[in-house]
Amino acid sequence: MSRSTQATSRRHRPIKKQEEQLLSMLDEDLQIIQGDSRRVLASIPDASFQCCITSPPYWGLRDYSVDGQIGAEPSIDDYLGDLVAIFGEVRRTLSDDGTLWLNIGDSFTSGDRGWRAPDKKNQARAMSYRPPTPQGLKPKDLIGVPWRLALALQKDGWFLRSDIIWNKPNCQPESVKDRPTRSHEYVFLMSKSESYFYDHMAIREPAVNGDVKNRRSVWNINTNGFHGAHFAVFPPELVRLCLLGGSRPGDRILDPFFGSGTVGIVCREQQRRCVGIELSQEYVKIAKDRICKEAAQAVLPFQSLISNTHSA
């Protein structure tokens, strides 16, 4: 199928011509690679990126219906092992003064239920499988996935520099009556080396006296919905703070779990280059369409979009 035929079939008819142009320009400002991060990263040279901003699939919470998906491992140890291996490759591909900004959420044990029913407000919540309760835990236990992962990465060689609390003022309500409603997730700031690039001036926050102060470790940022994706997406403001704190204009940024492409969109807005890796062909298309639409509506011109399929 020709590019013109593909463009005609897209939903966003008003920007058809812009999409054709964007998809045909082959620079290196934004590259989407479809493939398994475990294999794609192995082919990327050392010290290719200044920082990595990413949110891997959470363990046992979503079924993306893709063979080899992260988060569908039968045990928490397998999940942590997969992520430690992936982020070991991420560390290799970072510059010596590079950083990792890692968003990860927690979950509760399933009580050995093998499935999960859809939610009235979120049909995609349904799952045909649930992992068994991890050894040593009990039904209804909070698993502690973020800190298990952070400490495993620290043991593997990362410098653990900050545990940022992403507070969600507009969090989803929960029907639970025996615990508080969860309204936060973690963003871990990790570095490859003891000394690393961090632009504290770029992310200062307002002080009560009208001045500015060093950014605190609790970030109040609303969640953002995106109708094209089945699940919640990275809020652009969360990505923006990580990006400004961990890179300079023109730097190259990595997201090995690209999803619907928020990191790529914010990179473009902030004059950074980006490489995104995404396993799901469906999400590659979602990200491409979203980025093209955002680029066509932006004041600043979008310079490139490369879409590759990585051979296993």
Image (cartoon, helix red, strand yellow):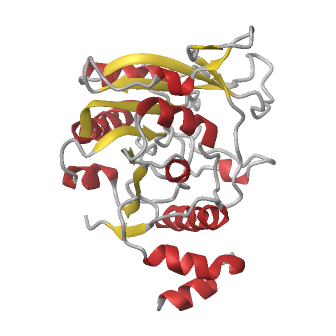
Q: Is residue 138 visible?
A: no
| Residue for point 55% across, 53% down | 265
Residue 138, position in %: x, y? 54, 19
Disc count in the image?
A: 0
| Residue for point 41% across, 36% down | 247
| The one of 1 and 183 positioned closer to us in this rendering | 1
Seen in the picture, residue 281 relative to 81 is either above or below; the reply is below
| The one of 174 and 95 positioned closer to us in this rendering | 95
| Residue for point 63% across, 57% down | 229
Residue 74, position in %: x, y? 41, 40
Residue 60, position in %: x, y? 52, 40
Residue 285, position in %: x, y? 53, 68
| The one of 112 and 87 positioned closer to us in this rendering | 87
Is 302 on the left-hand or right-hand side of 51?
A: right
| Residue for point 45% across, 67% down | 305
| The one of 8 and 296 positioned closer to us in this rendering | 296
Quadrant location, the C terminus: bottom left
Seen in the picture, residue 91 relative to 115 is either above or below; the reply is above
Seen in the picture, residue 105 relative to 298 is either above or below; the reply is above
